[in-house]
Image (cartoon, grey):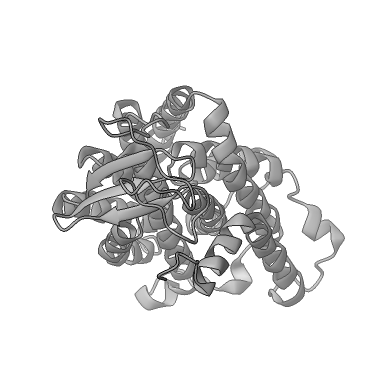
Amino acid sequence: MPDGTPSTRHQLQEGFLRNQHWFVFAAPVLFVAAVLTIAPTPADAGLDYWVEYWWLFPAFLAGATIVNTVGISGSAIFVPFLIFIFPLFAQPLEPETLVKIGLISEAFGLSSSSVAFVQYGLVDRKLALTLVAGGLPFVVGGALLSFVIPEVVFHALLGIALLAASYMLFKADLDHGGGSSDDSGATAATDGGTNVDLPNDHGKLGPAGVHTADDGSVTRVDREGDDYRYDRGGYLRRFGNYSIGGVFQGLAGFGIGELGIISMLKTKVPVRVAIGTNHIVVAVTAVIASLVHVFGGGLVGGHGMNLATTPWNMVVFTVPATVTGGQIAPYVSAALETETIKTFVGGLFAVISVALFLMAFGGF
């Protein structure tokens, strides 16, 4: 607008971002309310049924906080937890069931964290859209494949994915710094400022904005005033990583996040923008994979999975936990060295992958 007055759309956008916590936490409340009222549950389901798995809340809260801090898929921790730890306190789960629980929980957790990264101005929406469009067919294919492969192959593939994720985490530089100023030392203009060297958009919180030049170079400013300069080249290289990762995302509930963030870093996307954008990609693909895992078994002649087979008394605790972890993660990332968390998660993946190989080949 000529006078610089923000439009109604921009005012609504800024209002949503400023109050995103209320909207984010409303989602699991509505989800739990819907489960309690309309989900198909056992005929004798009473209070004991609904509180049986209360202890999953702290476990998934810790897992969601860790993975969202590093910027990887939640199921990379949730699925191994359900394979190895969950049976110590309850009954073992079928592979397709534990992947479904991991994906449903991850979809809510990453959606929560994604909104937080959007609030900070660290999501490249154009880049995210192309990555989702390229990876989605492979995610659907991997999810359908999960219905027909033997359990031993599932565990072996899961071990391979975790081992690869461990290696990539150790190799990746996931320092949450990465904000920079240009050579002149200019900083982002605050709302109403006169510095035109850096973008500042109405509807974003603080001095945030993004500008794409005619040559394709992008200048992005986050809400703290840090600026990031990059281009969106390297689509073919990213497509290779996201397609392979998409198959594992559908099959095991993770993979697209781990492979995807590596490909973005390798194509010179700044680390904080890569992490923020990757959250959107993983969140969308997790939602789609969850739907395929719930409804898709009949399409490939595999296991008949439907809403009635979902352990609702588990997800009523895992979903609120992952949403909360997604909101906590930005604060944890600011307080702790990401390198420390990365090393812990990478080592954990390596140990779990060895256990999965032993389980697949009869040694466990």
The answer to whether 112 appears left or right of 166 in the picture is: right
Residue 359 in picture, x, y percent from top left: 43, 37
In the rendered image, the vertical position of residue 311 relative to residue 69, given as above or below: below
Q: Residue at x 48, y 74 (%)?
A: 295
Camera-side residue of 60 and 269: 269
Quadrant containing the N terminus in the rendered view: bottom left
In the rendered image, the vertical position of residue 170 relative to residue 233, given as above or below: above
Camera-side residue of 19 and 103: 19
> Is residue 254 visible from the viewing direction of this image?
no
Q: Residue at x 35, y 31 (%)?
A: 169
As drawn, the residue found furthest toward the right would be: 47
> Is residue 359 visible from the viewing direction of this image?
yes
Residue 77 in picture, x, y percent from top left: 50, 40
The answer to whether 303 appears left or right of 322 in the picture is: left
In the rendered image, the vertical position of residue 160 relative to residue 113, given as above or below: above
Residue 239 in picture, x, y percent from top left: 20, 55
In the rendered image, the vertical position of residue 94 relative to residue 340, given as above or below: below
Residue 46 in picture, x, y percent from top left: 85, 65
The answer to whether 215 appears left or right of 177 in the picture is: left
- For the image, the number of numbered tags is 0
